Amino acid sequence: MTENSRPLDLLNSAKGKTVLIELKNGRSITGKLIAFDVHINVTLENSEEKQNGDTLRKLGNVFIRGDTIILISPTV
Amino acid sequence: MTENSRPLDLLNSAKGKTVLIELKNGRSITGKLIAFDVHINVTLENSEEKQNGDTLRKLGNVFIRGDTIILISPTV
Amino acid sequence: MTENSRPLDLLNSAKGKTVLIELKNGRSITGKLIAFDVHINVTLENSEEKQNGDTLRKLGNVFIRGDTIILISPTV
Amino acid sequence: MTENSRPLDLLNSAKGKTVLIELKNGRSITGKLIAFDVHINVTLENSEEKQNGDTLRKLGNVFIRGDTIILISPTV
Amino acid sequence: MTENSRPLDLLNSAKGKTVLIELKNGRSITGKLIAFDVHINVTLENSEEKQNGDTLRKLGNVFIRGDTIILISPTV
Amino acid sequence: MTENSRPLDLLNSAKGKTVLIELKNGRSITGKLIAFDVHINVTLENSEEKQNGDTLRKLGNVFIRGDTIILISPTV
Amino acid sequence: MTENSRPLDLLNSAKGKTVLIELKNGRSITGKLIAFDVHINVTLENSEEKQNGDTLRKLGNVFIRGDTIILISPTV
């Protein structure tokens, strides 16, 4: 990453890849990152709610409101 | 979905279909998505409050304020 | 409702009718919807605080600040 | 109230009269409504903190920050 | 106070006088009101944290961020 | 301080001096005030987390996000 | 640091270095600071969640939403 990179660059480079999203209510959701905007509103495909590595439930396509998000991490 | 998709595209494509909405207070509401705006204020028809797949009560038409919403998922 | 409807349309059509408003603190208020604005600030006439269908107290005319509102549902 | 009324109309008509204000922290304050603005910042004269109809303490003149307010109701 | 008074008028008239400020975390601070702005950020001189009329500690000059404030009351 | 002082004047006059900052999560941090902005974002040098006058840990240079701050008090 | 420094200067000077970030939910994350913006949205490389100096888990690249951040401290 360069001297002039911006935080959203990481999200741009993660489009089409699987990301882990942690929410303010303590829940974790993984899925393929489809889109995001400046509010960090996010849409995922094939999303699943996770707990300790286990799948709690499948959510499929999902829109997550940005103000509920703590962090987004591309998974390897 | 394309390279340039935006988060609200998912909501646009879900108009007229049944969605699951999870709220910050832990409640879940399902209903037919009628309208939304940039604040993610949403209106639903034939909405019901749900718990573990059971219907707690029927709400009918409902306006949900965007800042109370965690996620919106179109149901299959 | 049409393809181009907006969330506030539901509130507009509910003016002059009885609505149920649920607040973030867990309380429910019913009353005749008189006015609302883009912040979802709302005024009601003949309002009552409700619990499980029972009237806890009568509030009469009331102004409710929008950021305390979870949902608004026109009652049949 | 007319078709085109706005939520702040109720507060305007309550100026100079006694109102009940309920706060997000569960407290209630009554007093004569002197002024308000678009943030719903409010000033009261002869204000008192109330609980179950009893006066907990007299506050006199008070400025209340709008974002702490749930509802404002003119008392008869 | 006149028909056209605004909420900040009360704070203006309280400049140089002792005020009681109650915070969202349940604490109370008194002091001489020096300045405020539209966010209700406030500075006090000779401020003290109070509990039931007793002084918990002296804070001297203090800047209080507006969004932590519930109410401000000039003390007689 | 003059009739026309503003809340940020106190912070300006405290630059280069030691201040006490209390946070919404109940913690206290002291340090030399280096910079602040209109959001009350703050940077300190030689900062320490304090509890009852004792140093819990040294933080050195630190950026504190404004919306986590309750109050800032220059220490004598 | 000079008389005219701004809070974001500290973050600029920390780019490419390891920082400690403390979040409102009580968690701590360390990593190499790659980018930040005016909302204090931040991206880190080689990030780890820490507790009492121990690594709870490795997060790698991570985007952290600014409004969840309490403080950012460059580590020596």
Image: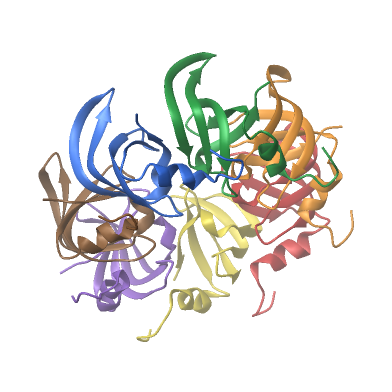
Chain colours: A brown, B purple, C yellow, D red, E orange, F green, G blue
Q: Position of residue F31 (x, y in %)?
A: 54, 27
- At 53% across and 38% down in the image, what residue appears? G1
Q: Nearer the viewer, residue F49 or B48?
A: F49
Q: Position of residue D11 (x, y in %)?
A: 72, 61
G72 displayed left or right of C69: left
- At 32% across and 72% down in the image, what residue appears? B8
Q: Nearer the viewer, residue E67 or C11?
A: E67
Q: Position of residue C11 (x, y in %)?
A: 50, 73
Q: Position of residue G63 (x, y in %)?
A: 29, 51
In which image quadrant can residue C38 be found? bottom right
Quadrant of the drawing holding the N terminus of chain F: top right
Q: Can residue C29 be seen?
A: no
Quadrant of the drawing holding the C terminus of chain F: top right
Q: Can residue E22 be seen?
A: yes
- At 54% across and 65% down in the image, what residue appears? C40
Q: Nearer the viewer, residue E63 or D30?
A: E63
Query: Can you say whether F17 is above or below B51 in the image?
Result: above
Query: Can you say whether E20 is above or below A59 in the image?
Result: above
Query: Can you say whether A29 is above or below E30 in the image?
Result: below
D21 displayed left or right of C51: right
- At 26% across and 23% down in the image, what residue appears? G53
Numbered circles on residues, count: 0
In which image quadrant can residue E69 be found? top right
Q: Which residue is most to the front?
A: G2
Q: Nearer the viewer, residue G1 or A46?
A: G1
Query: Can you say whether F71 is above or below G8 in the image?
Result: above
Q: Which residue is most to the right?
A: E2
